[in-house]
Image (cartoon, rainbow, N blue to C red):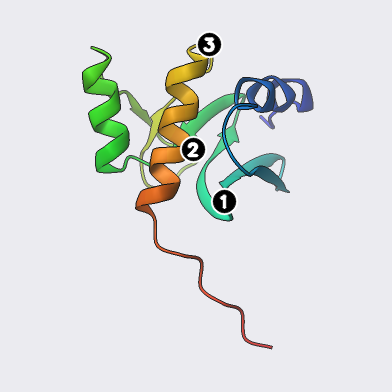
Amino acid sequence: MASTKAYLDYVLEQLDAAEEIAFRPMMGEYVLYCRGKVVGGVYDDRLLLKPTPGALRLLAEAGLAAETELPYEGAKELLLADVDRRELLCRMVETIAAELPAPKRKRT
C-alpha cells in the first residue's frame, strides 16, 4: 500500500518548526530529509525514523517506549514516530540529523 499525499502533508505540517525539512517521492512512499540528511520516511502512511542514540534517549526521557517497525520487507527496523507529538517529533528529527554523517558528495 502506498502512502497518501494527505498523510505526507500532515507530517510536514507537524514538522514545520524543524529546520530544513524536505522529502523525495520514492516508489509510492516518501523519503524524509532534515538538513540534507535522510532521517526516515513515510511508509504505508506511517512515519518511520532512524533509531539513533539521541532519538532513543528523547523517547526514554518522554517516558515512551521505542516501538520499531519495518518500512518494507528486507529493510532495517525504524522507529515508529508519533506524529501527534509535534514538539517531540521536531526535536527527534533534528537530533537524528545532527547525529548522522554528512551526505557523501556525488561524483560527476
Q: Residue furthest bottom?
A: 108
Q: Residue at x 42, y 36 (%)?
A: 70
Residue 34 appears left or right of 6 = left
Q: Circle 1 is placed at which residue position?
A: 35
Q: Earlier in the sequence, mark 2 or mark 3?
A: 2
Residue 90, horizontal then vertical, whole percent:
50, 27
Viewer-proximal residue, 36 or 71?
Answer: 36
Label 1 vs label 3: CA separation? 22 Å
Q: Inspect this view and state whether residue 74 appears.
A: no
Q: Earlier in the sequence, mark 2 or mark 1?
A: 1
Residue 94, horizontal then vertical, whole percent:
46, 39
Q: The residue under label 3 is which amino acid type?
A: Asp
Viewer-proximal residue, 24 or 17?
Answer: 17
Q: Quadrant of residue 49?
A: top left
Q: Residue at x 43, y 29 (%)?
A: 91
Q: The residue under label 2 is which amino acid type?
A: Pro
Q: Circle 2 is placed at which residue position?
A: 71
Q: Circle 3 is placed at which residue position?
A: 84
Q: Quadrant of the C terminus?
A: bottom right
Q: Earlier in the sequence, mark 1 or mark 3?
A: 1
